[in-house]
Image (tube, coloured by chain):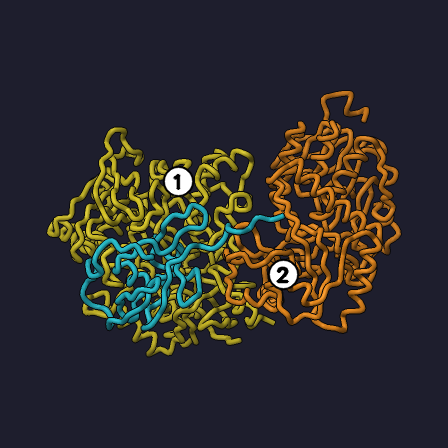
Chain colours: A cyan, B yellow, C orange
């Protein structure tokens, strides 16, 4: 479930595209068409975009420009995508993710 | 396969400058950029009436007028044999074989690990700026912006103008700015810009602390507190000077690292810059690299800002087109600006204390969650290269391909093997320079 | 070993810090010999560090249906030795028994595969020929669009650099000295005896020199008049992002690491002596991977790399004593990961006791003399894999 720590409008500044609704972990979130998913999630107060595979730490984003790969989310079923590099489109389904790997790999 | 005259990689000021100069010289140009449309970090953001926005709208119109083929949301995943440019675009891979290549892949904020730097809400200064300027979203209501150098000024201004409560924490003393006066005399427009920000910060009531730095960020699920401390001349925290501030976002900016991965994988020689403590692409006066017909421009050749990047791009693009006259004309714009950039780079060069936050329990490789302690243990056990450390600890193996941890690993190797950073082996850069799906690579058109 | 006993010199000087050198150093030190290992760059810097890491007795040959029994048995012995080493060295060795599948798409391949499997079985390797359905039981991610495949349940995988370090650390615990950053420049010869190695940091005297330095071994061997013709053959590989567990086995040079990444190999490019990745090579291996494991299609590749196999003329390993020369053991081969432990053990035996129970005739450097002056390296390479 997304961690909602403040009202959605709190960090929003005027401007941007038309309001559209996307789904985040099954709940509707209002976003602006064309903005990166990262902007929509951050403005909606969602902080833990993904949880790391080993330490199970919450992560959001660090660089915001496509370099750090720390704003990973699952978009329409495809995991490990950068929220900062993917624009919002109406009807999109976003899931915050538990990063794959390190689990279930006990070898003989 | 397409065979344009020139392929330009990167759609920031340098790449746009290169594409325009080459196109003006009659060349067919393909400009590949990863983002939605050409802008780069300086000009990113929605169309508006600001000077910057007017400028980039004009440049985009020029690209269109001159028939530059702009491939947005495109990724050059590798350059082979110094001429075969592999592009992913719209889920397919295309092979370009141009007569010349201009690399203008830009820079990103220098990542510096400290306790709490992986918490949501802790971000680079560039990220904070991107959010507020390009996406019209505040990173937080109460923001500590910490670091050193001129880039902090516009970021602090933009955050404060957007309504955030900002504390600007600078590691350098106030007099660092005064030392720039001699080099600044011949770049009045940059001085005006800087003074404008300083005035705006005062007007907006931004608290400005010199000789302080952020020592750690604290919080449970997101950042809640920023702990800052006074520093000495080497940026080492002074004991007993810590204080804690309630925040909901922290941004750090200690200068930039160049995105040299593509240039390096293409075989271009690099040069080590002592002030920046980083490797840049080595270029000659025509912006030519050590690889024939491959040029480089902008921040990957030295951190100097958008104006220098643009003119370097024009030199590179004109040279790639064999248009000496145009290159010479563009080169005239560079001299004083280069000198000022070097003065800035020296004044705000990172001091050793910058890295004292890399305690053993701090995660260095964010992707693979490898701590400084694990890396130090391996170095003490005999690992002497980034490759060995990568294989042992997985540091640098993740999705960011080592961009976030590479410079820190170099520093830990320097520390552990008692070598200067310049002598520490670099990790090899391998294609693809950013992750590419298997089905795309499997269907790729390959050079014959 | 009298020369060594006389002074402070070690009994054995191993040249080369790849898997072969580390294994030779480990077994020699474990048997009580005083060992110095010289490595020019760093451990696993060469072919070992770039290798896929397959540990297999399902030996393949491009040119022969039946691989010689002795070669299968050497591989089998090494596979078994890996299990023993896993007990001795523990998790750092990173040895996993995954079993290996070698699938084929076309029914017309079946007779050839059957014959191969029979040959391997007769030589002692537990290889079975399974149907598409049976393989699917073992590896559910495998495409149904195959005719069948060979399966060897005892095959395994190591992360080569981990194995090298584990062996080197083991050698160190048994008293070996590892000297990294020291380049071997030539052999020190006294009459018909090699008495040491000339290095970038002075002469290292030793009772016995074991040359395991890949292409460097051929250069050293020239010092005693031994010619080892080599082909340098490139192998390209890629690794993906971490994904949830998908693969259970080692499959056509693919395997999923504990972290969740999938390592995909490997090209076979004779006469390519650089470690460049190429678009063609990358496409070749990922296209096969996606054909075999359709679920890999959307998975992202993070990095491609390449290594150079050191293939001695004739294709088979060359290791052991050099006729007419005392105090020197040479060792060159391109299946050094699988064969490293057994070859290291045999070399250590030779260094300690001067003999081994293994018949090394087929691998003797002397047989190189029978080869024509110019060997078709391509033929050599394809002779065995």
Crowding around mark 1 (Cα neighbors within 10 Å: few <14, some 14 to 19, many 20+) is many
Q: x%, y% of residue C142?
A: 62, 65
Which quadrant of the rendered structure holds the C terminus of chain C?
bottom right
Q: Secondary structure at mark 2?
A: loop
Which labelled disc corresponds to residue B362?
1
Of B326 and C380, nearer the camera is C380
Mark 2–mark 1 distance (CA, rounded to whole Å): 39 Å
Which labelled disc corresponds to residue C42?
none
Q: Please report the residue visible at 36 percent of the width from the left and 48 percent of the height from the top.
A: B110
Tell me how many marks there are.
2
Q: Secondary structure at mark 1?
A: loop
Residue under label 2: C139
Of B298 and C107, nearer the camera is C107
Q: Chain of mark 1?
A: B
Of A63 and C367, nearer the camera is A63
Seen in the picture, residue B276 relative to B73 is either above or below; the reply is above
Q: Please report the residue visible at 83 percent of the width from the left and 47 percent of the height from the top.
A: C363
Q: Relative to residue C365, is residue B44 drawn left or right? A: left
Q: x%, y% of residue B299?
A: 37, 56
Q: Chain of mark 2?
A: C
Disc 2 + disc 1, Cβ < 8 Å: no
Q: Please report the residue visible at 58 percent of the width from the left and 55 percent of the height from the top.
A: C256
Asked if residue B128 can be seen in this view, the reply is yes
Displayed quadrant of residue C231: bottom right
Asked if residue B318 can be seen in this view, the reply is no
Q: Nearer the viewer, mark 2 or mark 1?
A: 2
Crowding around mark 2 (Cα neighbors within 10 Å: few <14, some 14 to 19, many 20+) is some
Q: Please report the residue visible at 72 percent of the width from the left and 55 percent of the height from the top.
A: C152
Which quadrant of the rendered structure holds the N terminus of chain C?
top right
Q: Relative to residue B48, is residue C191 drawn left or right? A: right
2 and 1 marks on the same chain: no
């Amino acid at each position: 479930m997304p961690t909602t720590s403040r009202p959605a409008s709190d960090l929003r500044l005027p401007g941007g595209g038309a309001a559209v609704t996307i789904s985040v972990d099954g709940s509707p979130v209002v976003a602006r068409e064309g903005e990166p998913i990262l902007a929509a999630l951050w403005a909606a107060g969602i902080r833990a975009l993904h949880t790391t595979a080993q330490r199970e730490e919450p992560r959001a984003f660090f660089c915001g420009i496509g370099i750090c790969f720390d704003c990973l989310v699952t978009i329409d079923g495809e995991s490990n995508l950068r929220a900062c590099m993917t624009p919002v489109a109406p009807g999109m389904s976003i899931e915050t993710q538990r990063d794959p790997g390190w689990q279930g790999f006990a070898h003989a | 396969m397409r065979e344009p005259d020139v392929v330009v990689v990167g759609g920031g000021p340098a790449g746009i400058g290169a594409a325009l100069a080459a196109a003006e010289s009659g060349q067919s140009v393909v400009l590949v950029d990863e983002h939605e449309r050409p802008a780069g970090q300086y000009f990113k953001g929605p169309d508006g009436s600001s000077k910057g926005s007017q400028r980039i709208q004009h440049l985009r119109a020029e690209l269109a007028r001159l028939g530059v083929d702009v491939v947005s949301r495109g990724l050059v995943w590798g350059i082979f044999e110094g001429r075969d440019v592999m592009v992913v675009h719209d889920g397919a891979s295309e092979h370009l074989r141009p007569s010349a290549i201009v690399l203008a892949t830009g820079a990103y904020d220098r990542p510096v690990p400290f306790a709490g730097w992986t918490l949501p809400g802790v971000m680079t200064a560039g990220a904070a700026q991107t959010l507020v300027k390009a996406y019209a979203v505040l990173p937080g209501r109460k923001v500590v912006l910490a670091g050193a150098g001129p880039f902090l000024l516009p970021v602090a201004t933009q955050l404060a103008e957007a309504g955030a409560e900002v504390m600007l924490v600078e590691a350098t003393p106030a007099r660092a700015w005064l030392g720039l006066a001699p080099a600044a005399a011949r770049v009045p427009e940059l001085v005006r810009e800087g003074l404008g920000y300083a005035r705006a910060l005062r007007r907006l009531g931004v608290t400005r602390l010199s000789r302080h730095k952020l020592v750690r960020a604290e919080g449970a699920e997101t950042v809640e507190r920023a702990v800052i401390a006074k520093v000495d001349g080497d940026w080492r925290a002074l004991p007993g000077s810590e204080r804690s501030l309630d925040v909901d976002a922290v941004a750090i900016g200690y200068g930039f690292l160049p995105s040299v991965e593509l240039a390096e994988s293409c075989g271009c020689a690099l040069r080590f810059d002592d002030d920046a403590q980083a490797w840049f692409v080595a270029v000659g006066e025509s912006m030519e690299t050590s690889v024939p017909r491959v040029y480089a421009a902008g921040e990957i050749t030295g951190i100097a800002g958008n104006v220098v990047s643009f003119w370097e791009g024009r030199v590179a693009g004109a040279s790639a087109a064999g248009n000496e006259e145009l290159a010479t004309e563009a080169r005239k714009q560079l001299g004083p600006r280069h000198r000022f950039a070097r003065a800035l780079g020296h004044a705000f060069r990172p001091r050793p204390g910058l890295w004292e936050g890399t305690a053993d329990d701090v995660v260095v490789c964010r992707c693979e969650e490898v701590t400084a302690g694990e890396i130090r243990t391996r170095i003490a056990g005999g690992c002497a290269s980034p490759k060995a450390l990568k294989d042992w600890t997985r540091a640098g193996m993740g999705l960011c391909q080592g961009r976030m941890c590479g410079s820190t690993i170099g520093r830990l190797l320097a520390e552990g093997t008692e070598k200067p950073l310049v002598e520490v082996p670099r990790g090899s850069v391998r294609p693809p320079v950013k992750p590419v799906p298997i089905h795309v690579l499997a269907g790729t058109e390959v050079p014959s | 070993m009298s020369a060594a006993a006389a002074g402070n010199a070690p009994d054995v000087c191993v040249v080369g810090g790849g898997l072969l050198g580390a294994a030779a150093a480990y077994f020699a030190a474990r048997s009580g010999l005083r060992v110095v290992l010289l490595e020019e760059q760093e451990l696993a810097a060469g072919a070992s560090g770039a290798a896929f890491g397959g540990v297999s007795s399902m030996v393949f040959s491009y040119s022969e249906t039946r691989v010689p029994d002795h070669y299968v048995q050497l591989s089998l012995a090494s596979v078994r030795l890996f299990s023993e080493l896993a007990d001795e060295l523990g998790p750092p060795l990173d040895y996993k028994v995954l079993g290996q599948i070698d699938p084929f798409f076309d029914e017309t391949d079946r007779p050839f595969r059957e014959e191969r499997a029979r040959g391997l079985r007769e030589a002692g390797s537990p290889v079975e020929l399974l149907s598409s359905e049976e393989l699917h039981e073992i590896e559910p991610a495998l495409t149904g669009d195959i005719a069948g495949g060979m399966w060897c349940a005892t095959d395994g995988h190591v992360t080569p650099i981990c194995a090298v370090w584990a062996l080197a650390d083991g050698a160190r615990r048994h008293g070996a000295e590892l000297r990294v950053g020291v380049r071997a420049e030539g052999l020190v010869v006294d009459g018909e005896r090699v008495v040491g190695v000339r290095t970038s940091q002075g002469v290292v005297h030793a009772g016995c020199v074991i040359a395991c330095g890949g292409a460097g071994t051929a250069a050293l061997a020239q010092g005693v008049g031994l010619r080892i013709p080599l082909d340098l053959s490139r192998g390209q590989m890629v690794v993906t992002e971490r994904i949830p567990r998908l693969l259970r086995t080692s499959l056509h040079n693919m395997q999923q690491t504990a972290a969740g990444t999938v390592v995909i190999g490997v090209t076979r490019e004779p006469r390519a002596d650089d470690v460049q990745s190429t678009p063609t090579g990358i496409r070749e291996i990922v296209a096969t991977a996606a054909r075999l494991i359709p679920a890999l299609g959307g998975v992202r590749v993070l990095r491609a790399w390449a290594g150079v196999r050191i293939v001695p003329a004739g294709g088979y390993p060359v290791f052991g004593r050099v006729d007419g020369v005392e105090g020197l053991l040479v060792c060159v081969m391109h299946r050094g990961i699988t064969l490293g432990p057994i070859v290291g053990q045999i070399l250590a035996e030779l260094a300690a006791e001067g003999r081994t129970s293994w018949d090394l005739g087929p691998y003797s450097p002397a047989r190189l003399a029978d080869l024509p002056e110019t060997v078709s390296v391509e033929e050599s390479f394809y002779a065995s894999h």
